[in-house]
Amino acid sequence: MTNLDKTSLQPRTGRFLVNAAAFVIVVAGMKAASSIIVPFLLAVFIAINCLAPFLWLRKKRVPRPLALLLVILCVLVIGFLVAALIGSSLSDFSSSLPEYQALLKAKAGVMITWLERIGFDFPDQAVMDSFDPGMAMGFVGSFLSGLGGVLSYTFLIALLIIFILAEASGFPAKLEAASKDSKASLGQMNAVIDNIKRYMAIKTVISFGTGAAITIWLSILGVDYALLWGLLAFLLNYVPNIGSILAAIPAVLLALISGGIGVTLLTAAGYLGVNLIAGTLIEPRVMGKGLGLSTLVVFLSLVFWGWVLGPVGMLLSVPLSMTVKIALDSHDDTRWLAIMLGSGKVK
């Protein structure tokens, strides 16, 4: 390597190290300030879903204060209904969690004994240490408890939603006044916002349908806490591919404890059927095959944001990544990054 090559390489290495150090500092700051960031991100997520009805009311010449009041009242009513319906189930499930974990461990021990009788030979303790089915229930308990903790920020989240929606209707006028090339800027901004609103609206409707179908199916089978598992299916449906699997695990394990093999198989078949219909038939046709994320990107986003922001970070990881992908896809210079994040094949 010549001296010229070494000289040109040094600035690149320095920039890389500075950017890496800045990234680590930003992530550490986000993790330390998660108690502030989580309510804000959740408010943004809810506000995007509320933006379509708010703008629809504005188009119908409903005054802005009244439109804001109606939307916020709807959000609060839905939130209180969910809290009232789920709160008791979550409390009962948390108190019964140690019992469920012990029963699952006993079931696993019976399964290991049966496998040993038919010829498989492995140490019981090593298997139980490496694979404990009770850990799945423990994870679900901590996950739902973490979500329940966010309810303590209800007033702050409601205020943030009000301010975000109030700013949203006047933002185009501000952008037009601030930008030199107002038409181009407004066109790009409107395209990004419209795509994000469309994605979030369709995903929310499909997720609600998924959660409702799971609740009805589990209620028919007599699985305990059907409403709780329906809510979990609704929330985790925002995480494609991986979310449906994570949502099914606790319900299938609980069906195994309370109903036996037959109910367990029917529970798993119900989850499989609902997610195949929603994820394979409905969602690609409504959204289009281009509005998808790579499975690797989904998994990495889930792990990263879950570690930084906790349970809410896991739920919002894919919507956040999808929002970034839509924004990148709207510009020619950054479209290649959107293609790299996507799941579709490049033509």
Image: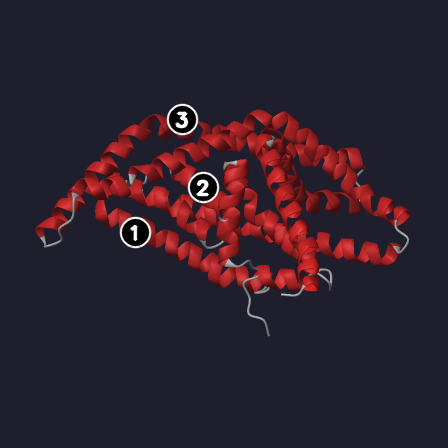
Image height of 330 relative to 93, above or below: below
Q: Do the residues labelled 1 and 3 touch (CB within 8 Å)?
A: no
Q: Mark 2 points at which residue?
A: 232
Q: In this view, does 180 lie to the left or right of 118?
A: right
Q: Amino acid under label 2?
A: Leu
Q: Mark 1 points at which residue?
A: 266
**Which picture quadrant has residue 47?**
top right
Q: Helix, strand or loop at disc 3?
A: helix
Q: Amino acid under label 3?
A: Ser
The circle drawn on residue 287 is none
Q: Are marks 2 and 3 in contact (CB under 8 Å)?
A: no
How far apart are the two marked residues, 2 and 3, measured between alpha carbons?
A: 15 Å
Which residue shows up at 42% across the image and 37% down it?
A: 228
**Which picture quadrant has residue 61?**
top right
* Quadrant showing the C terminus: bottom right
Q: Helix, strand or loop at disc 1?
A: helix
Of the numbered discs 2 and 1, the one sitting upstream in the chain is 2
**Percent x, y of residue 21:** 62, 42
**Percent x, y of residue 303:** 49, 45
Question: For the residue carrying disc 2, how many other residues have a C-alpha within 10 Å: few (<14), some (14-19), or many (20+)?
Answer: many
**Percent x, y of residue 135:** 33, 37
Q: Are marks 2 and 1 in contact (CB under 8 Å)?
A: no
Which residue shows up at 44% across the image and 35% down it?
A: 143
Q: Name the residue under label 3.
A: 91
Name the foreground residue: 107 vs 26.
26
The answer to whether one can see residue 291 in this image is no
Question: For the residue carrying disc 1, how many other residues have a C-alpha within 10 Å: few (<14), some (14-19), or many (20+)?
Answer: some
Image height of 247 relative to 119, above or below: above
The answer to whether one can see residue 333 in this image is yes
Which residue shows up at 36% across the image and 34% down it?
A: 138
Q: Amino acid under label 1?
A: Leu
